[in-house]
Image (cartoon, rainbow, N blue to C red):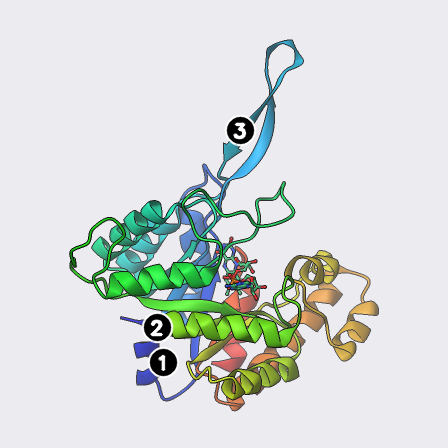
Amino acid sequence: MKVVDHINAANDTLFSFEILPPLKGKSIESIYKGIDPLMEFKPKFVNVTYHREEYIYRERDRGLLEKVAIRKRPGTVGICAAIMNKYHVDAVPHLICGGFSKDETENALIDLQFLGIDNVLALRGDPIKTESTFRRTKNGHKYAVELIEQIAAMNKGHYSLDEIELEPTDFCIGAAGYPEKHFESMNMATDLHYLKKKVDEGADYIVTQLFFDNKKFFHFVEKCRENGIDIPIIPGIKPITKMRHISFLPKFFHIDFPDELSRELLKCKTDEEVKAVGMRWGTEQSKELKAAGVPCIHYYTMSDSTEVKQIAREVF
Ligand code: FAD
């Protein structure tokens, strides 16, 4: 079932979460261990992230270095199929532009369709770790909007290689939104302009980047509505649970902590203290979002569901 159909059928805020494929070589059991405790909250869908290749240098004979591409977390599509099979909930694979030609994207979408996967979160992806800017893969897409255009075209039976119309796919398409704007955008107005283009090309709903200031989310939704973006907007929430998160989250996700939260975090001396503040904050944030009637709250588990479970207990 499609994410938007779940949203339309619900009479209360839904619960969903996002997981990462395990590091290469680890078993699918590590995924089940993270999902099992969250099933009591009856998630309607589970997102699985996609991780593109990275480049590393391997030492060869005579001191030579060889540049090799590796994927540390493969398995997105396989995990989606396994989740649907084991838990009978919908899985939403993330599909990115980086590393894919248009033909490879088309083939990936055909695989998803054959597996009975109705949903896809269409993203550009970040630059390769060793590069400072995102570069289009040969014959691939530069922006998520182009990927969305391709999926929407397939939904109408237009595939890339053939002039003739083929059997249409029927994907529900998600897109990313940024309550604190995407870090490459000149300003919020420009970012919203491009977000609107994603909607015009066929995005059915938006999932936001994680944020800690609900006011920024509500303002973002308001601005989206003013700009004619009228599809469901799902807030993304991540509990802070470790000292390391205090610097990592703002740096990696280009987000700010609100003053009140940063003041509380500054007083913390241990991971336990940080976790207590982070859990309190995440719970209050979730309760406020639910009270405001958001369609769904999407939790970023980042491979550990323990804290999300505790918050869900309080909220759902
Ligand atoms: P886009 O919508 O293409 O936007 C990228 C930038 O380009 C923005 O600044 C935008 O304003 C600008 N822009 C857009 N269109 C145009 C245009 N036509 N002309 C000029 N400028 C334009 N990354 C992964 O690698 N794997 C994942 O699984 C993953 N999951 C994510 C899930 C969520 C919910 C979110 C919010 C992000 C996720 N990301 C993931 C990260 C995402 O790939 C990065 O944030 C990436 O830098 C931007 O992706 P996007 O789809 O928002 O890009």
Question: Which of marks 3 and 2 precedes in the sequence?
Answer: 2
Left-right relation of 266 to 189: right
Left-right relation of 302 to 243: left
Give how far apart the Cα atoms at labels 2 and 3 are: 38 Å
**Where does the image place residue 307, in percent across and percent down from the top left?**
57, 66
The amino acid type found where label 2 is placed reads: Val
The amino acid type found where label 1 is placed reads: Ile
Q: Is residue 252 above or below residue 156?
A: above
What's the residue at 40%, 74% (across, down)?
200
Q: Residues within 10 Å of mark 3 (few under 14, many from 20)?
A: few
The amino acid type found where label 3 is placed reads: Val
**Where does the image place residue 293, in percent across and percent down from the top left?**
48, 89
Q: Nearer the viewer, residue 285 or 198?
A: 198
Closer to viewer: mark 2 or mark 3: 3
The residue where tag 2 is placed is 3
**Where does the image place residue 139, in percent across and percent down from the top left?**
40, 45
Q: Nearer the viewer, residue 163 or 250?
A: 163
Helix, strand or loop status at disc 2 = helix
Q: Residues within 10 Å of mark 2 (few under 14, many from 20)?
A: many
Give how far apart the Cα atoms at labels 3 and 1 are: 43 Å
Closer to viewer: mark 3 or mark 1: 3
Helix, strand or loop status at disc 3 = strand
- Residue 248 visible somewhere in the drawing: yes
The residue lying furthest to the front in this view is 163
Q: Is residue 182 above or below residue 232?
A: above
Q: Is mark 2 within 8 Å of ligand 1?
A: no
The residue where tag 1 is placed is 7
Question: Which of marks 1 and 3 precedes in the sequence?
Answer: 1
The residue where tag 3 is placed is 68
What's the residue at 82%, 62% (across, down)?
269
